[in-house]
Structure formats: C-alpha cells, structure tokens
Amino acid sequence: VRPGETFTYKWRVPENGGPTESDPPCLTYLYYSATDAVKDTNSGLVGPLLVCRKNTLNHDGTQVPNVNICLEFYLLFSIFDENDSWYLNKNIEAFTGDPSKVDEHNADFMESNKMHAVNGYLYGNLPGLTMCKNDRVSWHLIGLGSHYDMHGVHFQGNTTDKDHRGDVYDLFPGTFQTVELVAENPGTWLLHCHVADHIHA
C-alpha cells in the first residue's frame, strides 16, 4: 500500500478466536507491517486490532450501549527508535543545518532519536483521556519494542479490575491486553509508565 492510499483487509474470525464469557467484550491485538518489522514499526506502521464478541459492536465499530462500556481508549507504549526508521535520512536532511556534519553513529545522536512515547506522543502531551465519574472505560493496551520496553502502566487515582484490583498494569514487548476501569475518583490524574528511566526520558 503506497503512502496516502488505503486498503481494506477482511477475514473471518472463528468463534474460538474471540473473547470468552469471562473476557471483556473486545480483546486487544496488534497489527503491524511486516515488510521490515523493525523499520516499519519504528516508522509508525502499527496499531490496535480488536476482536469482539458477536453482537457487541454498532455498524460504526463502537461498542453497543448494553455492553456497559462508555468509553474506549487505545494506548501504545513504546520507545520508538528513529535510528531504525525509514525516515532517518529524510529527517536529517530536513531538520539539521548541515546534514554532512551529522554522525549517525554518535552515541548522543542515537540516544536523542529514542522517543519514549504513548501513542507517538512525547513529554506527557497525550490528548483526549477525559472521562466522567462512574464511566466504565475499556483500555486497550499495547506494549511494543525491544527489551527496554517493559512498561508499568500506572492509572493514578483509579483502579482496574484485571486479574486483581490495582492501579498498575505491566506490559512487555509484544504484549497486549484489554483492561476495564470504572472512573470512581474525580480529578486530574497522571497516566504514565512507572519505569523510572521512562519517566525521566
């Protein structure tokens, strides 16, 4: 698929490939381009793929009201390494004063291209995570990347009901999970990765 174009894939999901009665109505999976998995994912060719129980979605893809989910949020935690992106050379040409002076193998330069992101947003700038008291929220969490991508997703001020009641959910590279939360504690709360190195990045 060329840049700016779209293509629709359709496939049948067998009933045993979807949520069981003890699962949330929709389960989170991952799609990504596999032409060059490392370069493709570090260039942003990655995202969530939901498999939902039959009769739980409206025609527009939202969950039907009787499922009791008010909101859905999708969060991809990853350290995007732009050194391994298809766009590295284009970025050097576009954003440096003299591309010939850039040493792509310089340790500081390489570190500066490691973007600690949630949904591609850096420095706590992720928009749109607003909910109201008593909203039941489905969080579709994805962990991606290398061995550095161990993330403790901290839902400060509220708790989830996945496996046990708590406010931190651990994600590892190549893992994905659907976690449900009832917004019980109004206020402005931090949602972040609990790993100290990631907080400081």
Image (cartoon, rainbow, N blue to C red):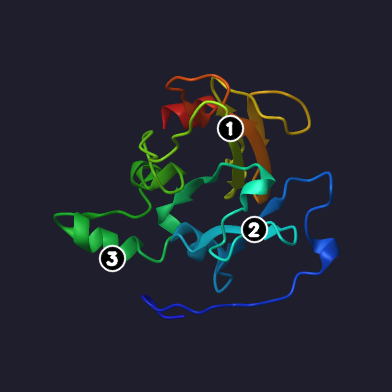
Q: Earlier in the sequence, mark 3 or mark 1?
A: 3
Dividing the picture into quadrants, the one containing residue 14 is: bottom right
Graded by Cα atoms within 10 Å as few (under 14), some (14 to 19) or many (20 or more), the crowding at tag 3 reads: few
Where does the image place residue 183, in percent across and percent down from the top left? 57, 27
The furthest residue to the left: 97
Q: Which residue is mark 2?
A: 50
Q: Amino acid at mark 2?
A: Leu
Q: Quadrant of the C terminus?
A: top left
Graded by Cα atoms within 10 Å as few (under 14), some (14 to 19) or many (20 or more), the crowding at tag 1 reads: many
> Does 181 sit left or right of 54 as displayed?
left
Dividing the picture into quadrants, the one containing residue 37 is: bottom right
Q: Residue at x 15, y 57 (%)?
A: 98
Instruction: Kindly report which numbered mark, 3 or 1, lies closer to the viewer in this rendering.
Output: 1
Q: Which residue is mark 1?
A: 153
Q: Which residue is mark 3?
A: 90
Q: Residue at x 54, y 61 (%)?
A: 38
